[in-house]
Image (cartoon, rainbow, N blue to C red):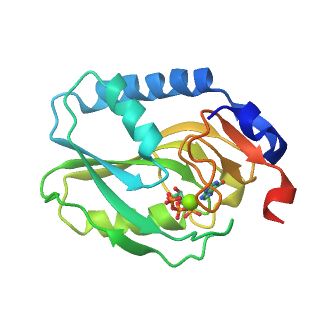
Amino acid sequence: MKAEHVHDDLSNVLFTKEQIAQKVRELAQQIDRDYHGRDVLLVGVLKGAVMVMADLMRELEGQYPMDWMAVSSYGSGTKSSGVVRILKDLDTDLHGKDVLIVEDVIDSGLTLSWLRTNLESRGPASVEICTLLRKPDAAKTDIDVRYVGWDIPNEFVVGYGLDFAEQYRNLDCIATLAPHVYE
Ligand SMILES: O=P(O)(O)OC[C@H]1O[C@H](OP(=O)(O)OP(=O)(O)O)[C@H](O)[C@@H]1O
Ligand code: HPA
Ligand SMILES: [Mg+2]
């Protein structure tokens, strides 16, 4: 879906489809460089990370198995509840693996902080994080993130996997939502 189809619901397009594609390519190059020859597992966080994972996987030159977790802390609102629930766990044993978590956005950081601790307790060789977006002004906890696409202002964004109440995930760009949609 293109921005023009939901024009009235959006206030500002932050990143176009082309800008996102270029950024994902750059992230893939860094990851290929750092993880070459290692026993890596990419862990995607459903559902928001589906787009970035799908595009990142295709840009990577090495072999990278992937697995998925579903956790939810937002429900249908625009604020994190702070309570993270596992809705679907990994199928893969993490012992000895270099785990790279792939996310769409780090907002308060509560989801990732909880998830990293959870995965670290499963005996992996390492756990690092790759996120397309991060909101430094929204951080409620300090997380060490190895790969960041863009730092963005503290506004609610949709598109490229990011939803508001399950809507707008299939928007091909990343945009801020007009206040009338959620107020
Ligand atoms: O840093 P935080 O404040 O914790 O927010 C970030 C998390 O919130 C969103 O997931 P959400 O719970 O909305 O699930 P979804 O991916 O299915 O939309 C997003 O995909 C991250 O996982
Ligand atoms: O800005 C956001 N948009 C959509 N989902 C989110 N989950 C955390 N922050 C966001
Ligand atoms: Mg969401």
> Is 180 on the left-hand or right-hand side of 59?
right
Q: Is residue 14 above or below residue 125?
A: above
The N terminus lies in quadrant: top right
Q: Residue at x 30, y 54 (%)?
A: 68
Percent from the top left, x then y, of residue 99?
26, 49
**Count of marks placed on residues:** 0
> Is 18 on the left-hand or right-hand side of 14?
left
Of residue 34 and residue 55, the one placed in the foreground of this image is 55
Is residue 146 in view from this perspective? no
> Is 32 on the left-hand or right-hand side of 25?
left
Percent from the top left, x then y, of residue 131?
49, 44
Q: Residue at x 44, y 29 (%)?
A: 27
Q: Residue at x 52, y 24 (%)?
A: 21
Q: Residue at x 47, y 23 (%)?
A: 26
Q: Is residue 149 above or below residue 18?
A: below
> Is 153 on the left-hand or right-hand side of 127?
right
The C terminus lies in quadrant: bottom right
Of residue 11 and residue 122, the one placed in the foreground of this image is 11
Q: Is residue 105 above or below residue 150?
A: below
